[in-house]
């Protein structure tokens, strides 16, 4: 695949007023989400739930792509149509989570490094054959006493850069996700400093590994105070700090930035994105790649009747897509 084709995919991922739905929960993570609302977690319930999400009527009005898990990219609708075909026929780009999750970083208690590079070239080639157009790798950076260490940031950025280069070799757009966690009692300034250091290291490492930025998407965390911080930040504070941090660290050649929701409420995730876009124009489109903030309300309703509530749950998915799509334009209103 040519560089121009990668750029075309990256630009389509952040098309005006559109964002991404992240439905790439591993089997253990989706089990936690199902357990919380009392749904049994089996291959069939996971399949049925992902079918509900991916067949939401008019999903592509505000959704450009969906990130899938390994099991999901191989699944089909109840009537036997592969999910990737349903998506491509409806103008939704198939994405795939390719990391194998965080593992403890030896020598650095409390810190993690994301694994999954071994055999990644072959896995990416298979995913490309299955229809994947982009891939995601999530690095996790925790804030705490003397954390993160520069070793943790460097190890994670190195893995992200090697993954991104392999993606581009396979004709897949890498979505690089360094998530700075909201867990803890740190203030918003600490989150700013950690996010800034992480993004500086990330883009330096991507450069060293010959990753082509025009064919790359950044999935970023917003600059927020920790969940247990006594000093709450206003919507304006969060938007201002996040935009300032991104402007200081992210090259303008990048086609777009999408945010994770990271445990924010649905309303916060939408409001923060909207506020940032109202502060534009920015060098790149700012959109969403939300998991929980796209799905939680719909999952809750579906759990009350997994046969009878499909259409009603899909209406909620479509509503959250519209709200976040409007926020990506800075035109959302309550
Ligand atoms: P949340 O929006 O629920 O944080 O999930 C997005 C995601 O893909 C995290 O890797």
Image: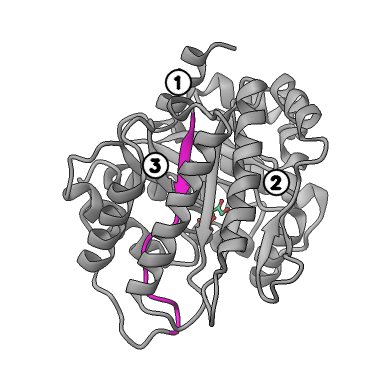
Determine the residue positioned at 53% across, 42% down.
205
**Can I make out residue 96 in this image?**
no
Q: Looking at the rendered structure, which numbered label has been put on residue 257?
A: 3
In what quadrant does ligand 1 lie? bottom right
Instruction: Give the spatial CA distance, label 2 vs label 3.
Output: 20 Å
Tell me which label, 2 or 3, sits earlier in the chain: 2
Magenta span covers which residues? 216-228
Say which of 180 and 24 sits in front. 180
Say which of 156 and 298 sits in front. 156
Q: Secondary structure at mark 1?
A: helix
The secondary structure that most of the magenta stretch takes on is: loop
Q: Which residue matches tag 1?
A: 7
Report x, y in % for residue 206: 53, 38
Determine the residue positioned at 38% across, 66% down.
193
318 inside magenta stretch? no
Residue 286 higher or lower than 106, as above or below: above
**Can I make out residue 263 in this image?**
yes
Q: Residue furthest bottom?
A: 230
Residue 225 higher or lower than 231, as above or below: above
Instruction: Give the spatial CA distance, label 1 vs label 2.
Output: 22 Å
217 inside magenta stretch? yes
Tell me which label, 3 or 1, sits earlier in the chain: 1
Q: Which residue matches tag 2?
A: 99
Residue 249 higher or lower than 122, as above or below: below
Say which of 180 and 151 sits in front. 151
Q: From the viewer's perspective, tell me whether residue 26 is left or right of residue 95.
A: right
Q: Quadrant of the N terminus?
A: top right
Q: From the viewer's perspective, tell me whether residue 86 is left or right of residue 143.
A: right
Q: From the viewer's perspective, tell me whether residue 111 is left or right of residue 238.
A: right
User: Is there a contact, CB below 8 Å, between mark 2 and mark 3?
Assistant: no
Q: Quadrant of the C terminus?
A: bottom left
Q: Secondary structure at mark 3?
A: strand
């Amino acid at each position: 695949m040519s560089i121009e084709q990668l750029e075309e995919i990256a630009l389509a991922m952040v098309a005006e007023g559109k964002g991404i739905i992240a439905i790439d929960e591993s089997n253990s993570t989706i089990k936690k989400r199902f357990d919380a609302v009392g749904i049994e977690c089996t291959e069939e319930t996971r399949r049925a739930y992902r079918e509900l999400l991916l067949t939401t009527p008019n999903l592509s009005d505000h959704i450009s792509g969906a990130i899938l898990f390994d099991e999901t990219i191989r699944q089909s609708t109840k009537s036997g149509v592969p999910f990737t075909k349903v998506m491509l026929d409806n103008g939704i780009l198939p994405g795939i989570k390719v990391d194998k999750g965080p593992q403890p970083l030896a020598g650095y208690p409390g810190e993690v490094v994301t694994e999954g590079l071994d055999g990644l070239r072959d896995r990416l080639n298979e995913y490309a054959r299955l229809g994947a157009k982009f891939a995601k790798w999530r690095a996790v950076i925790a804030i705490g006493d003397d954390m993160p260490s520069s070793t943790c940031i460097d190890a994670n950025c190195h893995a992200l850069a090697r993954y991104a280069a392999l993606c581009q070799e396979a004709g897949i757009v890498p979505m690089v996700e360094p998530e700075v966690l909201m867990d803890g009692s740190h203030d918003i300034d600490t989150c700013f400093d950690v996010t800034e250091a992480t993004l500086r290291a990330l883009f330096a490492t991507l450069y060293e590994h010959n990753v082509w930025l025009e064919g790359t998407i950044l999935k970023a965390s917003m600059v927020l105070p920790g969940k247990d911080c006594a000093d709450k930040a206003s919507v304006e504070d969060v938007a201002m700090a996040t935009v300032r941090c991104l402007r200081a660290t992210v090259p303008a050649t990048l086609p777009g930035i999408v945010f994770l929701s990271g445990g924010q409420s649905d309303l916060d995730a939408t409001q923060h994105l909207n506020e940032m876009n109202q502060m534009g124009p920015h060098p790149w489109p700012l959109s969403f790649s939300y998991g929980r903030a796209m799905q939680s309300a719909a999952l809750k309703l579906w759990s009350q009747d997994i046969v009878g509530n499909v259409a009603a749950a899909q209406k909620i998915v479509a509503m959250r897509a519209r709200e976040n799509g409007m926020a990506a334009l800075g035109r959302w209103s309550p």
